[in-house]
Amino acid sequence: MLGRINSAAASAAGKIRSTSVGNLGARMISQLAEPREPQVLTSEIPGPASTSALEKLSKIQDTRAAAFVADYEKSVGNYIVDADGNQLLDLYCQIASIPVGYNNEAILQAARSDQMATALANRPALGVFPSADWAQLLEESLMRVKPAGLDMVFTSAHGSDANELAYKAAFMHYARTRRGDKMFSAAELSSVMDNQPPGAPEVAILSFAASFHGRTFGALSTTRSKALHKLDIPAFPWPRAPFPQLRYPLDKYSEENAKEEQRCLEETERILRTNAIPVAAIIVEPVQSEGGDRHASPEFFRGLRRITNELGVLMIVDEVQTGCAATGTFWAHEQWGLESPPDMVTFSKKMQAAGFYHTSDLVPDQPYRNFNTWMGDPARALLARAIVAEVIDKGLLAHVRATGDYFTSHLKPLAVRYHRLVSNVRGTGTFLAFDCPSTEMRTELLHLMRMEGVNMGGSGETTVRFRPMLTLSKSHVNVFLTRFESVLNKMYQKHWPQ
């Protein structure tokens, strides 16, 4: 019996199991122990089992972006296991979306609960038929970590969806403040059906150069990170403001960076005042995560809040990637010291649920306006409740700060020693990054690291980003550092032989 179970678990394609085997498999998953170090069994990744599985999958889905096929039953903690049995320390974590480790026991318990079974078997249309426990579930999950000053939450499906719905809230608020108490006019009701003003007004969302806010239509119009994301897709004529391009180390270039941020603030204000299409809101990331891990100072973001307040423009903070403790505070914008909170904060990824926080002022004047069938998902909120509890109960904020400090203190000396390959070490918490000299060098480095048993990812043109679990420890960092220095030595010997 156990032999058949182990054989099935090892199969790359997987097999349909009986209920009894499935239950035993669940118990076995909960007893997994994290490896002490990576183990690479194949001469290449993807190995033969991953390659075979990808070939099969490619007949029904596009697999060209796939790195390898994972075995999620065997993955545990900070380690992802692939179909060939390779055990990799995962510092990329499903594009920054796994919070507290693979097969985390608290998450598994939430997944196996009767409450989860009911939520999955009876997914409700929450806007019309919310479940009796929905308010309590929100209080115990998303509202337990609500950003200061934002007392309501709109739940949605994913990060792009969260931003899209926040834009709609901004546009409705903009129109309502100008319409006042008047009802919709006959001209508005008629013209909107032809996508024409005044019913479909010309109003914009301002975003920043190198930003990423998603791939749905409105979100894509505010995404500025890569042309490939946007090509061939019709877009709204919305404005783009410059985002500071800081120089490192920060203490050496403090004067130059302050001037760069002031330039960007002045240009943003000029656009907001003079743009041909009025701007209802700006959207900004605390760290431009897909655009190359581009940072700005708290002073810059305080300047944005001052300008938007003065001009009556809403400020949306996109915390889809930075939210849920990765920067050392639960929300990265907490580190800005704003005098007044953002108007909306969007979230997804590590929260395993999505949506945006807001005030009551941003509730539409009529029901069914910012709306869809499901309006979120109780199953995702149940996972978010378990995640939030793990972060708070296990002190993961302090843990992330301590691990991040340790990580940075070792990365910076390596950037000095291997300066031809590693530069501009930056970040807060474990939300860290550095730059390579070229895209090609980065590709080579990431491949060599994977063959050393460390799964990593890039952003922008030349940046390597770290997006580990919140449970990453100093011992995990040491595992990485040993292999990282080995790869750096190999690359130096290849490209700059003595």
Image (spheres, helix red, strand yellow):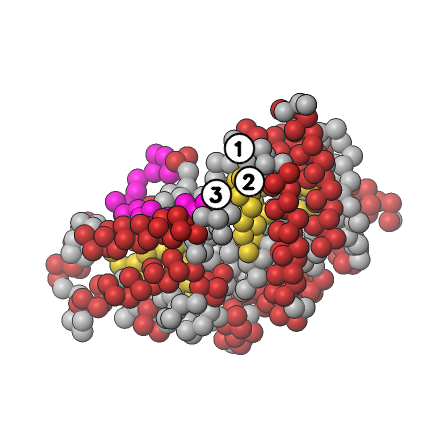
Q: Residue at x 51, y 47 (%)?
A: 249
* 2 vs 3, front mark: 2
Query: Could you tell me which secondary element the residue under label 2 belongs to?
Result: strand
List the residue tagged with mark 2.
Answer: 423
Query: Could you tell me which secondary element the residue under label 3 belongs to?
Result: loop
Image coordinates for residue 260, horizontal then vertical, percent: 36, 48
Image coordinates for residue 281, horizontal then vertical, percent: 30, 58
Of labels 1 and 3, earlier in sequence is: 3
User: In the displayed structure, does residue 243 sit left or right of residue 106?
Assistant: left
Q: Quadrant of residue 155?
A: bottom left
- Picture mark count: 3
Q: Nearer the viewer, residue 492 or 475?
A: 492
List the residue tagged with mark 1.
Answer: 437
Image coordinates for residue 358, horizontal then vertical, percent: 39, 68
Q: Is the Cβ of the residue at disc 1 closer than 8 Å to that at disc 2?
A: yes
Instruction: Tell me how far mark 1 sits from mark 3, CA to CA.
Output: 13 Å
Query: Could you tell me which secondary element the residue under label 1 belongs to?
Result: loop
- Answer whether residue 415 is visible to the viewer in this image: yes
Instruction: Tell me how far mark 1 sits from mark 2, CA to CA.
Output: 8 Å
Q: Residue at x 54, y 49 (%)?
A: 426
User: In the displayed structure, does residue 137 sit left or right of residue 449?
Assistant: left
Amino acid type assigned to the residue bearing label 3 in the image: Gly
Q: Which mark is residue 21?
A: none
Of labels 2 and 3, earlier in sequence is: 3
List the residue tagged with mark 3.
Answer: 292
Q: Is residue 337 magenta?
A: no
Q: Residue at x 62, y 33 (%)?
A: 445
